[in-house]
Amino acid sequence: MKNGVFCGDQTTLAAGHGSKCQRALLHPWSHSDTPGAHLVGIAGAGMRALADVLLGWGWKLSGSDLAIGSVRELARDGVRLSEGHAAENLPPETELVVYSDAIAAGNPELHRADELGIPTCSYFEMLGRLSSDKECLAVAGTHGKSTVTAMAAEVLVEAGWDPTMFCGAAPMGRRSGGRAGSGELVLVEACEYRANFLHLRPSLAVILGIEPDHFDCYDSPNELEHAFARFARMVPRRGLVLARHDCAATRRVIGELSCRVETFGTDAAADWSARNLAHRRGRYGFEVRHQGRYLCDVKLRVPGRHNVLNALAAAALAWENDVPAERIARSLGRFRGLHRRLEVRGSFAGVLLVDDYAHHPTEVAASLAAVRRMAPGRPVWCVFQPHQVSRTEHLLDELAESLQNAEVVLVAEIFRAREGPPHDGEVTAADLARLVRARGVEVPSLHAVEEITRLLEIRLAPGDVLITMGAGDIGKICDGFDNRLRADRAAG
């Protein structure tokens, strides 16, 4: 890392710089002066959460991003915001620069920090440092990390633990996934991208399942499993790994750990099992059993069978932290979900609007199945935005298969996260659309968001369901309908 500081081994800040930041990092909840940090890429979900945590601990912040419209409210909290990246964005009082994974090495703000000798660190290096002398509870896995992190935080807050949370999605009713707590527990959504979770030192780790996903940094499933194995080995002998029972890759990863391991799943053979599942319009209830012993009944507000496993993992984490079973059940039953996770946005002209983050075939299939149960018998329109060319290319057939559970599918142009301009011969949205169409689903030959929106305005009918899916900006279609609905109500 730049300046030889803040690396994965958590070495100290360079001498002569960042003394207030150094003290605040060691005791961020009880510092006597005000450290200052600049966040490069502040509009990203993780960095947005970090900003809220640091503000809650009294830090003085500035930040920049290519577009800052989604975080303008931070200015009301005293954060100096800059749109675009430039060397002059660093305030004179900056003592530390934190950057997101989306920031390129040649960023002028990082270059300026180097020139001035200001320490720099990545988002996950920062989380590793902030959680280094607390009880770090890390939630990893290909799917469900944000939901389990937020569910567990809900339970622990209700139990009086006052945890700190770093989550990559905002719980309903909150503006980000960051929560500044004063308790001993720090909940972290632990991402496998670029093996970022190796910056953490968890006393408890959750592994929600392992599937190939980040093809721009893992060349093979073996490499991915190796990274998860290294992460699991971070847990000390006295700690605990909670692992998904029915995932073969996860079971390989936990095979030779020295710490305690417990599994979770719907199978009675799992240490933590969800039994006697039943649902009403896609919202599930189930029994929680630990090593065969009944603990409680949980009734979820959030839809989707996949959330049964998410809730079970959160329950196991909370139980390990001495939360009584009845309180676990009550808190999980109150959990309202996350923004862009099967978020029901309302109805427009009799059409139910749902927005979802799903971008991997497993997630797409699970979300469409959940929508079918939420609105039985209603025609489903799905607008899917593939996320990254590399992911789309590697999972093309799987994505086509996962999009079968809808009457009409529209495939928007690929969202090119962390990728350069298009080049000849690469996979396109039209390629995915052809494969979905070949399986018998209606797929109009439109890929621009503006054209898709116009078609929806013409063809959607009362009683239909519209779900927008993807990890990019596809939710703006739902935003458009929602804004028009608000305008109509105001005019009325």
Image (spheres, rainbow, N blue to C red):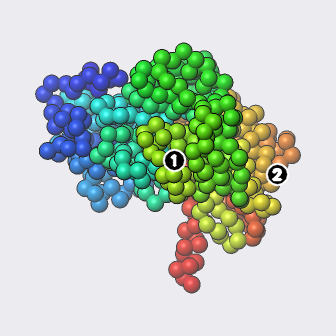
Work out which quarter of the rendered image holds the N terminus and state it: top left
Q: Is residue 475 left or right of residue 425?
A: left
Pointer 2 local density, CA inside 10 Å: few below 14, some 14–19, many at least 20: some
Q: Nearer the viewer, residue 184 or 64?
A: 184
Q: Is residue 465 left or right of residue 166?
A: right
Q: Secondary structure at mark 2?
A: loop
Residue 252 locus on image (x, y percent): 61, 19
> In the image, what residue occupies the spot 24% across and 30% down?
119
Q: CA distance from mark 1 to mark 2?
A: 47 Å
Residue 166 locus on image (x, y percent): 40, 42
Residue that label 1 marks: 325
Q: Residue furthest top?
A: 256
Q: Nearer the viewer, residue 210 or 295?
A: 295
Q: Earlier in the sequence, mark 1 or mark 2?
A: 1
Q: Please determine whether, in this image, residue 83 is positioned above or below residue 113.
A: below
Residue that label 2 marks: 442
